Structures are given as structure tokens and as C-alpha cells.
Amino acid sequence: MLDEIDSKLITALQENAQLTSQELAERLGLSASQAARRRQRLEGQGVIKGYRAELSAAELGLGVQAFVQVQLTSHAPAHSTSFNKLIKSQPEIVSAWTMTGDADLLLRIYSRDLTTLNDLIHNILLPHGAVGRVHSQIVMSQIKQDAPLPA
């Protein structure tokens, strides 16, 4: 169970993961050692799973973001394992979810351009034996950036 201070700490770290214990303490009304212990406890409990840098896809030359729905023809364990291994091996696929509804999986993909995305879909995803159909949606603009989780 998280208390109000834990929630404030999590919110602050999601805004800026580089806050020092002293900076956290000032925001939370605690001593630096108390703030550090709370952070360590939340890390130890797995509430805080890690820290990452937020990068600019555009500055990295990744001009296309797409969501690709994948419908499988086979849900046999061997096919699922093989396909999951394939999507994990593709760095352009930054996240993947199994879904309910028409699509079995939803993939979030960043690529340099449409040609590169087309190559990934037609030469890597579609040839896999478990894939029956893909449906891609190209992101025109992102209205809301990936937001912190509510604490």
C-alpha cells in the first residue's frame, strides 16, 4: 500500500528521475535520508522498476511511428513462442501487447521511413507461419505524450 508521500515521490520521479535525495526531500517535506530510504523501499518492492532516458525519435532519425495489429492463424505454443521471439528481436518494435478482439497482438513500431516499415511488415512479420493478417496504422501526430502512471 502506498501512502500520500510515496505517491508524491513516485510522481516527482516520473517527472524527473534524476532528482537527488535532497531534491526529493525538499519536495516531500522529509530529510534526505528519509527520502532515500523511501525510494530504496519502493525500488525493492518493485514499484519502481528502473530509470530511463526519454529520447527524441525524430532526433534519432525515426520519422515514422506506427501501430500494427497482428492476427494469428495459429495459437499453437511453438508458433507463439517463435513469433514472440521474432518480435523481441526487432529493435524497431518498441512494445507489444496481446489483445482481446480481432487482433491478437498490437505492436508499436518506430522506423526511419515508410519503406523501412513496409520492409519490416512484408519481409519479417508476414512471412512468419503464425501470421494471418496485419493491419497497420501510421501515427500522424501524437496529441499526448506518454504520460506518467497515476500514483
Image (cartoon, rainbow, N blue to C red):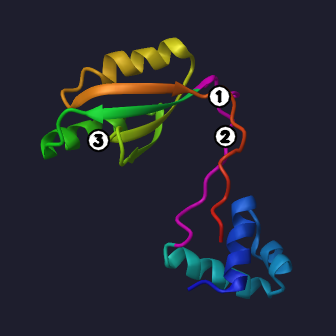
| Magenta stretch bounds | 47-64
Q: Earlier in the sequence, mark 2 or mark 1?
A: 2
Name above or below for residue 23 compared with residue 34: above
> Which type of secondary structure does the marked residue at label 3 adopt?
helix
> Which type of secondary structure does the marked residue at label 2 adopt?
loop
Name above or below for residue 121 compared with residue 4: above
Residue in front for this viewpoint, 90 or 4: 4
The residue under the point 69% across, 36% down is 142
Name above or below for residue 97 compared with residue 71: below
Label 3 sits on residue: 84
Name above or below for residue 150 compared with residue 78: below
Q: Position of residue 43 (x, y in %)?
A: 55, 74
Question: Is the Cβ of the residue at disc 1 closer than 8 Å to that at disc 3?
Answer: no
Q: What is the CA distance from the residue labelled 3 to the residue labelled 2?
A: 25 Å
Label 1 sits on residue: 60
Residue type at the position of mark 1: Leu
